[in-house]
Image (cartoon, rainbow, N blue to C red):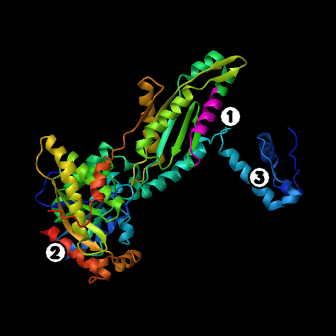
Amino acid sequence: MPPPTDPPTREAQALNLDAALQLLDQSGHRLPDLREAGKAVWLQAVIDGLCELSSRDPLTGLANRRHFELMLAGEVDRVARAGEPALVLMIDIDHFKKVNDAHGHPAGDEVLKHVAHTLQDCIRPMDTVARFGGEEFAMILPNCPPSFAQAVAERIRIRIQSMTIPISPGETVRVTVSLGGAFAPQWVRSSALLWVERADQQLYRAKTEGRNRACLEQPAVSLVSPEEKGLLFGTSQFQDFA
Amino acid sequence: MSTPSAAGRILAVTSGKGGVGKTFVSANLAAALAERGERVLVLDADLGLANLDVVLNLSPTVTLHDVFTGKATLEQAIVPAPGGFSVLLAGSGLVEYSRLTPQVRDQLAEVILQLTPRFDRILLDTGAGISDVVLHAVSLADEVLVIVTPEPTSMTDAYATIKVLATLQKRRHIRLIVNQVSSAGEGRTIRNQLQLVVDRFVAPQLKAEGDPVPLMLELAGEIPIDPLVREAVSKRSLLLAIAPGAPAAKAINAAAARIAG
């Protein structure tokens, strides 16, 4: 392992940052010049770098499960009072073991990276996509109206299905994903655990119904049609109701 | 469906949207009913976001959660509130129950069964929205009171709630309190507007299902926008206690009289 580009001063060395700096260097994290930036700024950059590292999945570069759970807890608090619809999607690569068995683990890693990249490509800046574990990914989509949810999930499914993944020179594979989704109960403080569990149940349903499909929990709310809304607000306040 | 009980009138207080003053109305309505001589209990059935204790400035040590988990008796969990009524709080430990398990369902029904002989009136302050917890809490009640404000989101959500209560629970009589009205008569207008949409869209659906009994919305009261409400809330006091002569307090008393019959 080469030494960090900016050799730490005596004070910084007293903190014993060798392991931390090695990790940052290995992950390609650039630190500001210690002498130019000053000790405080440089140390903050070290800490920020470590935080960043501890919230990322090293293989895919996505948020890891730790970061996902942090974001999810925040979202639970937010939607409970705001009442806006928020969706969690659990996404699992179908028959991933077969890829590993047939082409080896490096090929499996390529598949994970490509799927991760495509998922990242499918979301809005406000959304979070994470590698949840193994071949399972998870997404938080704040402010996602229930009427859009199926289309959003389908778009992801189709994007993955139509992707050709190069695993070695001249060799490609294709994979599909199953998706399960659940909305946070509006106006009710759910727990992050329950929310993911409900999305997981839908993922299980997608798997048992034949994979390469998206199953979403139906929100219990009965929707008010545009016609009903029109009548509720469209008519004059001073209309004669007799 | 609820089983009407002779011993206690159970009134579920609900709303479509949160933040319409549901807990404020529950607490002050309870005080108004207590003032009329009723033995009143407010059961905070907002299992997810219980905040009756905040509104009433109570620091309960024993909650419904403790009763459910066998840590305390029901007796210990019933606490007196300022305003001459009793409260039974859900407790934040019930967070996990945001999804209704059959066990909680049974426990809640059992608790209400035990409470009915002891009170003239039980107000179930439910969570906002139409979650299964809210629907279950409402199903345990003899009557439903929906709190709505003139705000469009609130009206839409109130309408959605009314629709669900009519179709899933076969409710045919739903009371309304219109909170935060800016002019006298606005509550009546909103009630009429909701009734109009119900008659046009919900009634035919009920009829098609072989149930031609009309759904009636009854205006139980309108509460005007009143700066004293804000003051009471910020002091964590009952409006009826700190400003009994305030327009909003008078409106709540009038609603209590109508509900008491």
Question: Which picture quadrant has residue B181?
Answer: bottom left
Based on the picture, tell me whether residue A120 belongs to the magenta stretch: yes
Residue closer to the observer: B184 or A23: B184
Q: Is residue B33 visible?
A: no
Q: Amino acid at mark 1?
A: Leu
- In the depicted structure, whether residue B69 falls above or below residue A60: below
Q: Residue at x 46, y 48 (%)?
A: A86
Q: Chain of mark 3?
A: A
Pointer 2 residue: B37
Q: Is residue B60 left or right of residue A170?
A: left
Q: Amino acid at mark 2?
A: Gly
Secondary structure at numbered mark 1: loop
Residue A131: % across, % down: 59, 37
Pointer 1 residue: A59
Pointer 3 residue: A46
Q: Residue at x 38, y 53 (%)?
A: B94
Q: For the C terminus of chain B, give its image quadrant.
A: bottom left
Residue closer to the observer: A184 or B110: A184
Of mark 3 and mark 1, the one earlier in the sequence is 3
Magenta residues (range): A111-125
Q: Amino acid at mark 3?
A: Val
Secondary structure at numbered mark 3: helix
Secondary structure at numbered mark 2: loop
